[in-house]
Amino acid sequence: MAVEKKILVIQTAFPGDAILTLPFIQELKRKRSECLIDVLCIPATEELFAASPHINAVIPFDKNGRQKSFFAFISFIKKLRSNNYEIIYSPHRSVRSALIAMNISAKETHGFENSNLKFAFKHTVKYDPSAHEVRRNLEFIGNDYGDDRWKIIPEITVSAESKKKVEEFISENKITKFITIAPGSVWETKKYPAEYFRQIIHYFLNKKYQIILVGGTNDKILCEDLREGNEDSVFSLAGDFSFIDTIELLKRTSLLICNDSAPTHLGMCADIPVLTLYCSTIPLFGFYPYNNKSNYISYDNLLCKPCGIHGFNKCPLDTFDCAQLLLPNLAIEKAEKLLANAS
């Protein structure tokens, strides 16, 4: 019996980046079905990779905790080396990712040409800053993804427990026609103003939609504030639903409205209409919703925009014009078009 080749994919970035790596993994498995594909990721994204039917094993790397020290890092690399990986792909471009790739004795190592310590990789591919992140990652496989062929929906297996959890929530709260809103972000300058979200919520409540707010534990206070006065028709699941739970919920929503953050990509997993609101960042960075049901909106007539690829904890100019000038009526108009197209 032939021994299966083992591939390691290194992706230790945020959840959104993790999701945008899944189409590459799907295509890699399709083209190299004889190989076992393992993924090295941070604990926060372990759940997402574990739900992919194309991944053999998920290896959590706690780079800010248990494996942060030099000696713990070296010990971790030694354990990885014992897995005998023949091929490594590193969509993540950090120094640590490069050091891991360089020190586990794989025959082939692949990284981007602009990776930190790019000499760690035996093969490098072009990083096209004008392309979508999914398309950039597919460059590791080849040039078969021109036109719209790169628009591959991530495949996620939703557990029976997640399906039951969502069904029970919908049944207990008598949820029928609803719009989902994810108002949070790790970066403050990516957050659309809460008052503007409140106006959007009130508009759609008047159109007889229920509203479900989603996000992480850090978004609980914001979501509860947005519920105030409408607790019977606005529900918050921030911190209560996992990524996989949220994907299952999104499959039932009419529309997701969110910032330039991970929920956009959860919406791609669910293959639903998504409206992404861009404040300090821009769609040209390559993280926009890409299925045919979705769109985005951004106020770009500003010399200061974009001020950074990730955003900041505070507007560098103390104006936050990129968000303040993106008025709620503009977002509502775009949302209505998406709803009309989906009906």
Image: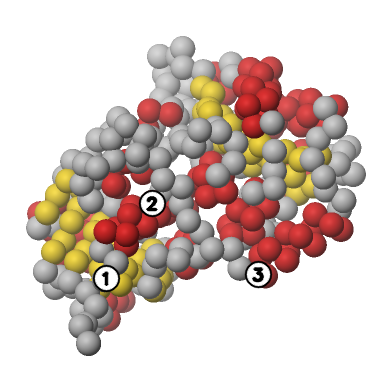
The answer to whether one can see residue 193 in this image is no
**Which circle marks residue 23 in the picture?**
2
Colouring mode (rainbow / by chain / secondary structure / one colour):
secondary structure
Decide: is 131 above or below 124.
above
Q: Which of the 4 quarters of the picture holds residue 339?
A: top right
Which element carries disc 3, helix, strand or loop?
A: helix
Question: Which mark sits nearer the N-terminus, 2 or 1?
Answer: 2
Mark 1 burial class by Cα count in 10 Å: few <14, some 14-19, many 20+: some
In the rendered image, which residue does mark 1 sit on?
35
Question: Which mark sits nearer the N-terminus, 2 or 3?
Answer: 2
Left or right, residue 121 beside residue 259 = left
- The answer for how far apart the CA atoms under marks 1 and 3 are is 28 Å
Rendered location of residue 100, percent (x, y)? 23, 66
Q: Report the amino acid beneath label 1.
A: Cys
Tell me if label 1 and label 3 are in contact, CB under 8 Å.
no
Q: Report the amino acid beneath label 2.
A: Pro
Mark 3 burial class by Cα count in 10 Å: few <14, some 14-19, many 20+: few
Which quadrant does the N terminus fall into?
bottom left
Residue sitting at the far front: 1
Which element carries disc 2, helix, strand or loop?
A: helix
Query: Residue shown at 41%/19% (left/top)?
Result: 304
Rendered location of residue 167, percent (x, y)? 76, 60
User: How many numbered badges does the structure rendering display?
Assistant: 3
Q: Which of the 4 quarters of the picture holds residue 168?
A: bottom right
Q: Which of the 4 quarters of the picture holds residue 181?
A: top right
Tell me if label 2 and label 3 are in contact, CB under 8 Å.
no
